[in-house]
Image: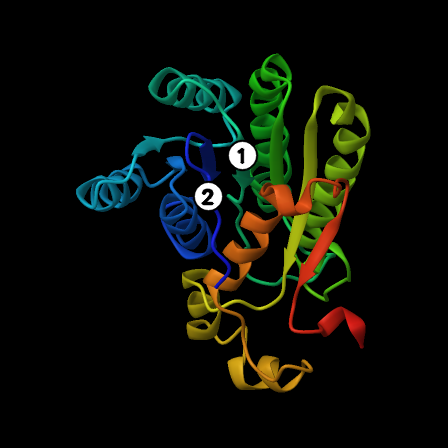
């Protein structure tokens, strides 16, 4: 894997205790960044932070529900108080509910998905931008999805939120370039994460079929998404903003 030197920089990762978030946290820490691990699972965030600090890395676990703007604001403030600045963010927290006929979806399910996947990214960016604008620099990566680029039967609201994340990303990139802040998105395909394992266990996903349906012929690894996030945050992507980058084994090329 390509290595980066983020010494003296600070990263903020939502949904950071497992899956793609945890892989990205570890990648930032291995690149010498201080990392805030922000997750609804406060115990999981704290355990991962303890693992990293036990290896001599700088990490802070923060319990946070991204649907609550006050909690997000507090998490960003805790990060800056602990580490002095905020340079990079991966707004990764998201959920997917079981598929449902669009004519039967409840307002409760709709509101829950929107609250986490869209409002959560909005709140996270809002408070990250306050600090980054003050500094005059920063890089934000939002987690959209393959579902932000295509539709999917039975998951209209999920796909709507992930399309919305791309809209947020592009619009904020246009507004904040003047402040030295770059904003991009990653669009992962089917990645071997706990969420995908749960979908498989419920019979919602056939991993072999998903792997056979893409040019690379396999599912992705969380570390491969992390690698894309780190590149977008690095000086190697210094002229890249407003992009929705597929990390999808070629699915959208078909």
Rendered position, 38 above or below 200: above
At a point 31% along the width and 40% down the height, the residue shown is 45
Q: For the residue carrying disc 2, how many other residues have a C-alpha within 10 Å: few (<14), some (14-19), or many (20+)?
A: few
**Along the polypeptide, which appears first: circle 2 or circle 1?**
2
| Image location (x, y in percent) of residue 95 | 52, 50
Q: Give the CA separation, mark 2 to mark 1.
A: 13 Å
Give coordinates of residue 213: x percent, y percent. Answer: 67, 83
Labelled disc at residue 231: none
Mark yes or no: residue 110 visible: no
Q: Is residue 128 left or right of residue 72?
A: right
Residue at x 34%, y 20% (from the top left corner) = 82
Specify whether residue 220 is in view: yes
36 and 234: which is toward the camera: 234
Work out whether 221 lies above or below 183: below
Q: Report which residue position mark 2 lands on.
A: 5
Label 2 sits on a secondary structure element that is loop
Please name the residue shown 69% across and 82% down the image: 215
Of circles 2 and 1, the one toward us is 2
On the image, numbered disc 1 is attached to which residue?
A: 88
In the rendered image, the vertical position of residue 132 relative to residue 248, given as above or below:
above
């Amino acid at each position: 894997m390509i290595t980066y030197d983020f010494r003296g920089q600070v990263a903020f990762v939502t949904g950071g205790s497992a899956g793609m978030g945890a892989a990205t946290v570890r990648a930032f820490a291995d690149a010498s960044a201080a990392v805030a691990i922000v997750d609804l699972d406060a115990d999981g965030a704290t355990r991962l932070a303890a693992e990293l600090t036990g290896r001599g890395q700088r990490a802070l676990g923060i319990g946070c529900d991204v649907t609550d703007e006050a909690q997000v604001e507090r998490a960003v403030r805790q990060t800056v108080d602990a580490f002095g600045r905020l340079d990079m963010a991966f707004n990764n927290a998201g959920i997917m509910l079981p598929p449902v006929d669009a004519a039967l979806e409840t307002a409760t399910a709709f509101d829950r998905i929107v609250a986490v996947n869209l409002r959560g990214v909005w709140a996270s960016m809002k408070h990250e931008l306050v600090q980054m604008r003050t500094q005059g620099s920063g890089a934000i990566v939002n987690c959209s999805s393959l579902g932000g680029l295509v539709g999917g039967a039975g998951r209209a609201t999920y796909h709507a939120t992930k399309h919305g994340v791309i809209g947020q990303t592009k619009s904020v990139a246009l507004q904040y370039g003047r402040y030295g802040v770059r904003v991009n998105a990653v669009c992962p395909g089917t990645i071997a994460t706990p969420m995908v394992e749960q979908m498989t266990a419920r019979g919602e996903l056939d991993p072999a079929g998903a792997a056979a349906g893409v040019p690379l012929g396999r599912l992705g690894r969380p570390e491969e998404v992390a690698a894309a996030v780190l590149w977008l945050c690095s000086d190697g992507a210094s002229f890249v903003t407003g992009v929705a980058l597929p990390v999808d084994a070629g699915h959208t090329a078909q």
